[in-house]
Amino acid sequence: MPEDKPSESVENFVKAVYVLQSELNNKADDDEVRVSTNALKEALEISAPSVTDMAQRLVENGLVDYRKYRGVRLTNQGESLALNLLRRHRLIELYLVKELGYQLHEVHDEAEKLEHSVSDRFIEAINTKLGQPEFDPHGDPIPDADGIFTRRELHPLSELPIDTRGRISRFITTDSDMLQHTLDRGFVLDEPVEVLARDPFQGPITVKLGDIQTVIGYTVAETILVEVTKN
């Protein structure tokens, strides 16, 4: 490993900023959104002073732009590092499922550990072995070596209009129990889905899943992303 390789804590911090910043960008048409120290504190499960200390250190390393009371956003260098980490994580997850027989709900925590320790050569060998895949087993896009990834217009199943057809394209929960519950109910990637009815006040949602009709809770439906289809 190179001597100047960032520490695991630095890598986790940068990746957390990227994920939170991406979520904010999806909700607001603003290229200058910043991630609050409180959001990072919760995501990383560290104290607010530790978040501030790390942010200030990473300003010196050129990885983030931190402004007191306004929050953190990644520099171009920080974004490149974050995308590299996501590439590692998602390729490892896919390898664990495709080649080693892991169940989908098992791979996130395993990949969290491995992404910091394996070599670039190992990651590229996985990429070649798997045929340069675009998506991981959760449906998350896998950045290529240049940080470029496939972008799709996806909608939470909880918000899909009634009588609109789609296909399940991504699971965004990292809660292994919720993910397993989702899979046990028959919600798998690429399965056709259509909302038939929706109870008010975030109540249960009745859907047509493939050829069957079933009901799913609103909270779970929020974690299932769907791509609208024409047919």
Image (tube, grey):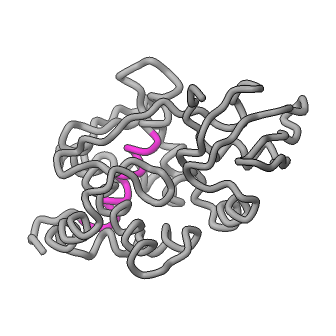
Which residue does the image show at 9% across and 71% down from the upper left? 3
In the image, taking residue 61 as reference, residue 101 lies left or right, namely: right
Looking at the image, which is closer to me, 140 or 2? 140
Mark yes or no: residue 57 visible. no
User: How many numbered marks does the figure carry?
Assistant: 0
Residue 41: say if magenta. Answer: no
Instruction: Find residue 36 and report its horizontal and vertical position in percent.
Output: 48, 37
Quarter of the image where one finds residue 157: top right
Which residue does the image show at 80% across and 50% down from the upper left? 212
Which residue does the image show at 49% across and 21% down from the upper left? 28
Magenta-colored segment: predominant secondary structure: helix
Residue 15: say if magenta. Answer: yes
In the image, taking residue 93 as reference, residue 215 lies left or right, namely: right
Q: Decide: is 148 above or below 184.
A: above
Instruction: Find residue 72 and report its horizontal and vertical position in percent.
Output: 37, 37
Instruction: Find residue 89 and report its horizontal and vertical position in percent.
Output: 36, 63
Of the 4 image quadrants, the one containing the N terminus is bottom left
Quarter of the image where one finds residue 90: bottom left
Magenta stretch? 7-20
Quarter of the image where one finds residue 130: bottom left
Of the 4 image quadrants, the one containing the C terminus is top right
Mark yes or no: residue 81 visible. yes
Looking at the image, which is closer to me, 120 or 212? 212
Q: Decide: is 25 above or below 64.
A: above
Q: Decide: is 116 above or below 101.
A: above
Which residue does the image show at 54% across and 47% down from the upper left? 170
In the image, taking residue 200 as reference, residue 93 lies left or right, namely: left
Q: Decide: is 224 above or below 26.
A: below
